[in-house]
Image: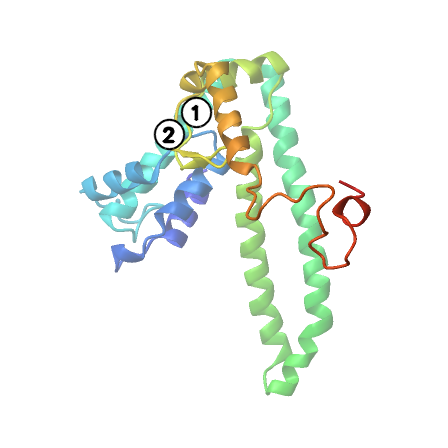
Amino acid sequence: MEEVVLQKVQEFTSPEDPSEWRLRALADWVNLTFPLGVPEEEITKVAQEGREDPVPGSLFDGLTAAQFSVCTHISGKIREAYNLKVSFENPQALESVERYTILSAIDKLWQEHLYNMDGLRNSIGLRAYGQRDPLIEYKAEAFKLFEELMVNIKTEICHNIFRSASSLMAFENFLRKLPQQTQHQSTSAFGTTSTGSSGADAAESKPSDVVSEAAEALSKAKPVRVGPKVGRNDPCPCGSGKKYKQCCGKNG
């Protein structure tokens, strides 16, 4: 988990220029992969307050104080969520579920890796036309594919470990304890926008408010007449010379 968080923090942040940090993308990845509700403002605050440098020779060696602070903060949040999940699980059943989750991720991604290696083996000969040694190119490309495989396996495990449980009851209890809060601006079905709100606030909304909102939206959607009303015995506006009821008004 820490390796995956580290890789994503390095991907979405820059040690040289903090203005190039893609905090929205980082927050979206964290909240979609793990059951967390970490807003961009929280990541920004943690980065600004970071003063501790990583220990030389550790996993986080080479990060700035801000990047290291973000890594440790996100990792701590994930660990808290995992400990909460484990508290509702059957330990023996959870061990089997997690073993199945890990083996499934390895099996699926390893098969995809073998397909990619076959495609690389069949196409690497074309590098000779560019005055490059196919054997050296094959070793370099194969190493990159293997590194991507390891990252994808760990990411897949982190993604699925919170989406599996030893029982339905344990999963439901875990979901009830999670923070239910939206962070981004949302758009309702009737075109109105609102900021993020907690699940309890959404549950307290009155049905009358929803009905009034729907009625207001429908009234705005009614067509507006821009010309005078044509009587049934008046000449048809299309210029045919017939009465409106015998021409364009037949299907009215």
Answer whether residue 252 is visible to the viewer in this image: yes
Residue 89 can be seen, yes or no: no
Q: Are marks 1 and 2 in contact (CB under 8 Å)?
A: yes
On screen, residue 102 above or below 22: above
Could you tell me which secondary element the residue under label 1 belongs to?
A: helix
The quarter holding residue 178 reads top left
Q: Name the kind of residue labelled 1 in the image.
A: Ala
Please tell me which residue is depicted at 59% across the width and 59% down the height of the picture. 145
Residue 221 on image: x %, y %? 55, 37
Question: Picture quarter containing residue 182?
Answer: top left
- Measured as percent of width and height from the top left, residue 45 is found at 24, 39
Residue that badge 2 annotates: 77
Q: CA distance from mark 1 to mark 2?
A: 6 Å
Q: Identify the residue shown where x is 37% and y is 34%.
A: 38
Relative height, residue 170 to residue 198 (above, below): above
Q: Residue at x 68, y 62 (%)?
A: 117
Could you say which is closer to the camera, residue 155 or residue 100? 155
Residue density around tag 1, few if under 14, some if 14–19, many if 20 or more, within 10 Å: some
Side (left or right) of 137 relative to 107: left
Q: How is the image coloured?
A: rainbow
* Horizontal side of residue 16 vs 129, given as left or right: left
- Compared with 126, 13 (above or below) is above
Question: Where 196 falls versus 122 (above or below)?
Answer: above
Q: Amino acid at mark 2?
A: Lys
**Disc 1 marks which residue?**
81
Callout 2: SS: helix
Q: Nearer the viewer, residue 187 or 251?
A: 251
Q: How many marks?
A: 2
Where does the image place residue 18, in percent across and percent down from the top left? 26, 54
